[in-house]
Amino acid sequence: MTDSTDLPDAGPTSMPVLETARLAIRPLTSDDLEACHQLYQAIGWADPDLSDAESRAARGRWLDWTVR
């Protein structure tokens, strides 16, 4: 397991990185946009009234807010 002090900004609300041989749970980064967008599309959480580009932009705004 990785210690939370390994995080870029290990403030009081930082989550630790949890790792096993097959899984890593870590805070999101701005580089996760495409994966988040694809996941939300795949599980039906994307707004069906938005185009793919609009949906990706909305997810990007959410991700920017999340990683602040």
Image (tube, rainbow, N blue to C red):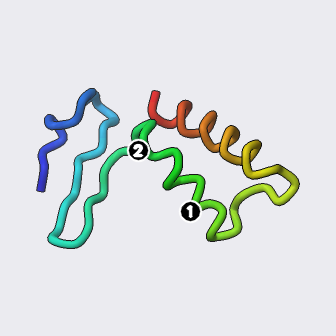
Residue 28, numbered label: 2
Please report whichever mark, 2 or 1, sits nearer to the chain's N-terminal start: 2
Q: Amino acid at mark 1?
A: Leu
> Residue 18 location, x and y as percent?
22, 57
Quadrant of the rendering where the N terminus is positioned: bottom left
Could you say which is closer to the camera, residue 8 or residue 13?
A: 8
> In the visual, does 28 lie left or right of 25?
right
The residue beneath circle 1 is 39
Q: Amino acid at mark 2?
A: Leu
> In the visual, does 9 lie left or right of 20?
right
Task: Tell me how far mark 2 sits from mark 1, CA to CA.
Answer: 13 Å
- Residue located 34% across and 35% down the image: 13
> Residue 23 location, x and y as percent?
26, 67
Q: Of the residues tagged 2 and 1, which is closer to the observer?
A: 1
Disc 2 packing (10 Å; few <14; some 14–19; many ≥20): few
> Residue 42 location, x and y as percent?
62, 69
Q: Secondary structure at mark 1?
A: helix
Residue 23, numbered label: none
> In the visual, does 25 lie left or right of 49?
left
The reply to whether callout 2 and callout 1 are in contact (CB within 8 Å) is no
- Residue located 52% across and 50% down the image: 34
- Residue located 60% across and 38% down the image: 60
Q: Secondary structure at mark 2?
A: loop
Could you say which is closer to the camera, residue 58 or residue 5?
A: 58
